[in-house]
Image: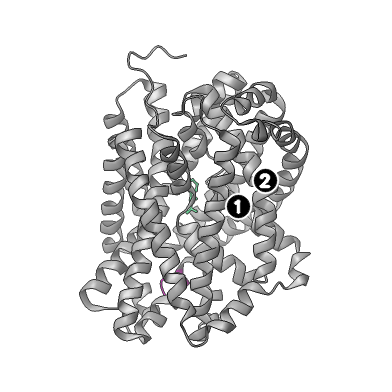
Amino acid sequence: MTTTATPREAFGSRAGFILAAAGSAVGLGNMWRFSYQASEGGGAAFVLLYIAMTLVLGIPLMLAEFGIGRRGQLAPIGSLRKLGGRAWGPVGYLFVAGGLLILSYYSVIAGWTLRYAAEVVMHGFSSSPAEHFVAVAAGWDAVAFHVGFMLATVLIVVGGVKGGIERASLLLMPLLFLMVVGLAVWAATLDGAGKGYVVYLKPDLDELMNPVVWRAAAAQAFFSLSLGMGAMLTLASYLHRDQNLPESATIVAFTDFGVAFVAGLMVFPVIYSFGLQDAVSASTVGALFIALPSAFADMGAVGRVVGLFFFVVLAVGALTSAISLLEVVTASVMDEFGISRRKAAIVMGTAITALGVIPALDTDALGLMDKIAGEFLLVAGALALALLAGWRVAGEVGSELLQGASPRWQRQVPRILVVLRFVVPPIVAVVLFFSLRETVTAIRGFLVG
Ligand code: PHE
């Protein structure tokens, strides 16, 4: 235990923690990246592989983070050092660096969603969405929206675990669920919806055997479940011992999948009713701000209302994810340097805002940062966590997971540990190898181009 004068903050309710963790997980990754990956990876084949990855890698790794965090009662650097020994401290620093990097560009994308929502209210969608996106994605306007989004994030984190993070999650997450379902129901009424469902839900069995799709499904699971950089670890460090961790992890993972899946039930019909499939495969984030807006623009007033909802959902999802990213960094600085939450959140929030100016001015830089952090750092972090929880401190993690769990869930704990020890590390190591190759290629491309 550190010798801080005030006791550690804590969540006020079971649901508060679950919604905060779900809030971290549900974000831009669900609303867009999932559909994009599914359209590239054979529709339902990707969806099936994604479910498999969630079960085999996602839930066990989330439990590794939950167990380590609640056991350590400190942010990543402190908890890893406390449990694993001094040598594990640097891994914690890597997590903090990951959080810093991810939030700096994630906030730029979130800023785009804010801008689109504001534009829809003021004058509707542009009739030439591709040109519009190119014009607004990078530049000082993008910086301004990024700063605005960071400001909101910092304000909530300054509010603390209970008064800020928990309160925001209890309010925003139900709202988000409702809006996503509403969007999917609306999409079902579109003329060409059936075609979209077929592409989305009919598995292309060749893709099921494709290692590229496997890797994509695994990397998507880490990103979407906020694993591999201590976000879940940090949230769990604010828990009392009565929370049922295995049950919570399962709920969070399925909520995350559910939102991604339902979002797909909206995205695919829209894309196929408007024949926009080519615009989708053009690029990842760009298409979100090009393909869908061009469909909304075609729909007149209805498109304006639906489009507004869509971009508000994106912004809300991004906000609850950004909170957890900033919390990793803030909590680590608080624990390591013993400074106040307010000071830590403001100083680190400002640093991240400054770093974000780079991706806000240069979309290539943004893409590169996403590759380095999203594809590589998270996977490397996940491997480290599996080794720590499955091998080095398996006993401690195991007994932590038993505490607060009902007998039914307690019976799963030994199984989870076996998976963390023997199944997760080899798979993640293979994924890491391919991710490293992709990342190096991306860096080379960036330097040359
Ligand atoms: N899970 C978030 C999303 O899907 C992104 C995220 C990654 C948040 C890592 C926190 C940590 O958008």
Name which residue lies at 59% across and 65% down.
37
In the image: residue 198, left or right of residue 336 = right
From the viewer's perspective, is residue 202 above or below residue 333? below
Residue stretch in magenta: 286-290
Q: Quadrant of residue 378?
A: top right
Q: Is tag 1's residue or tag 2's residue first in the polypeptide sequence?
A: 2
Pick the residue in front: 403 or 100. Answer: 403
**Residue nearest the viewer, comparing 220 with 166:** 166
Residue 91 x %, y %: 57, 31
Q: Position of residue 46 (x, y in %)?
A: 66, 64
Reply yes or no: does residue 287 show up in magenta.
Answer: yes
Residue ranking furthest to the front: 407
Give how far across and how far down residue 145 sits, in percent. 28, 58
Mark 1 Cα shell of 10 Å, populated few (<14), some (14-19), many (≥20): many
Residue 437 seen anywhere in this rendered image of the structure? no
Residue at the extreme left: 122
Amino acid type assigned to the residue bearing label 1 in the image: Ala
